[in-house]
Image (cartoon, rainbow, N blue to C red):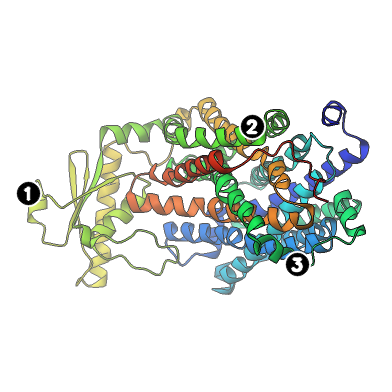
Amino acid sequence: MADAATARAMTREERKVVFASTLGTVFEWYDFYLYGALAAIIAREFFSPADPGAAFFFALLAFAAGFVVRPFGALVFGRLGDMIGRKYTFLVTILIMGLSTFIVGILPSYSSIGVAAPVILIGLRLLQGLAMGGEYGGAAIYVAEHAPQGRLGAYTAWIQTTATLGLFMSLMMILGTRTVVGDEVFAAWGWRIPFLVSIVLLVVSVWIRLSLNESPAFRRIKAQGRTSPAPVSESFGRWKNLRVVLLALVGLTAGQAVVWYTGQFYALFFLTQQLKVDPTTAQLMLAAALLIGTPFFIVFGALSDRVGRKPIIMLGCVLAAATYFPAFKALAWAANPALTEAQARNRVVVEADPADCSFQFNPTGNARFATACDLAKQTLAAQSVSYDTAPWEPSNAAATAAPPGQALIRIGTTEIVSPSAHGVPVDEARRSALAFRQAVGRALADSGYPARADPERVNTLAVVAILSYLMVLVTMVYGPIAAMLVEMFPTRIRYTSVSLPYHIGNGWFGGLLPTLSFAIVAQTGNMYSGLWYPVVIAGATAVVGVLLLRETKDVDIYADD
């Protein structure tokens, strides 16, 4: 029967189910990722009191807020999905998502309503996260429960394309709007247009989903009176099911999540923030990679029906852990060769007493770093310069003459003493800091450090090739995962059991990746050190998955009914 199912084409009803579920979910991801793609503008509009670096971190934290609450949405909507049905649950989720996104488009900025602006924005992100927590599981399960045995990987792989297609749509809408209205108008108010357009997408999505019927698997257990009265406690209160949930999280979704967010969002942030590539250029190159890579979701999903889900997903995690560092270093050489040449030729070192150096992560903008070491690190972070730290070891007359508690920045053979603001009048401290920053800027320029990536030297083909490789890794871990998660749990608790590990993995391990990785970079001073986070998580998932997960491709998802 499985061979016959594999050989035949989709029926008209199956095509309708896949198309409707996929299209609706694409629109939800479009809504969700607009914020991430416009993080720099969001930082300026809603977190303006903070300095630019802190505002960007705060914007990333607000972006992450939507991911943090996704597991809670999984519990709420997963329970509803297992009790009242798949169809009506993800109708509710898309309404919440679409309306929240539309309101962002009309939300006044900080300059208009003050602190209420970021508070409301974060509230809307939380609503989006709750909705997304119920969306993915519903769509993936709905498609899987319509798929014939032996083709779950091929059918559910279409749902796996939706996150990438939603990101692609958001990038294209942003680029199209920017092109039509111009950069100046876009920065002033045109950035709101992609958010406002979401209301049209919402109407289309709701209309599509209203035309669908409930899944046959859920109809079957409901007709037999075997739906779970308490799917949350049944999923997580019984060790037999809880053990599978934990394995799905640690040995599957955590690694998949960091690979997904590294290959798409972190890669975009790395290009624009660390390598100083023009945002429009970076978005276009990423969009090209998304187009190249997206068909591989279907390829690996269908392949998993033949060779298994586990080998493909685990291989993707292993390749990611093994190749991220060389891949991102190659990305730096291709996107901003002047920066990598300057780093190789003129190493930057901050010399200071370690006790005077604070943790350089200030998402709220409330902390004030006053030591000489803090000023030195802040100055280099603002310039996106990688640096090493070393104990204070004065080597020339200027440094030797510096009083205790000061620090210096060494750029090649140039040394610049960093002043301290402790015990210094405010005006004098500001003048000293300004003079220091200007001196560092001149020294960096003299040493070949570029203020931005030279468009003439960006190797577009190489950048797109590297981004495409990262995308292929994404498709390896993501293409087969929906089918595997569905096959791991029985129908009566499937919505709840699938949704929670997926959204803890993607909401916490993946969604927090940009924020945590940039915090690591800010702390260490090395622009590649943020990659340790996805490398460790992907490696750990590969170990746990290989040792403890069982293959599921031959599981009959109706056998337990």
Quadrant location of the N terminus in the rendered image: top right
Q: Which residue is mark 2?
A: 293
Q: Which residue is mark 3?
A: 230
* Three-letter amino acid code of the residue under disc 1: Ala
For marks 3 and 1, give the CA distance.
75 Å
Mark 1 burial class by Cα count in 10 Å: few <14, some 14-19, many 20+: few
Query: Considering only vertical position in the picture, is 22 above or below 7?
Result: below
- Residue 38: mark: none
* Three-letter amino acid code of the residue under disc 3: Ala
At 41% from the left edge and 30% from the top edge, which residue is drawn? 333
Rendering coords of residue 115 (x, y %): 54, 73
Q: Secondary structure at mark 1?
A: helix
Mark 2 burial class by Cα count in 10 Å: few <14, some 14-19, many 20+: many
Q: Nearer the viewer, residue 303 or 384?
A: 303
Q: Secondary structure at mark 2?
A: helix
- Residue 397: mark: 1
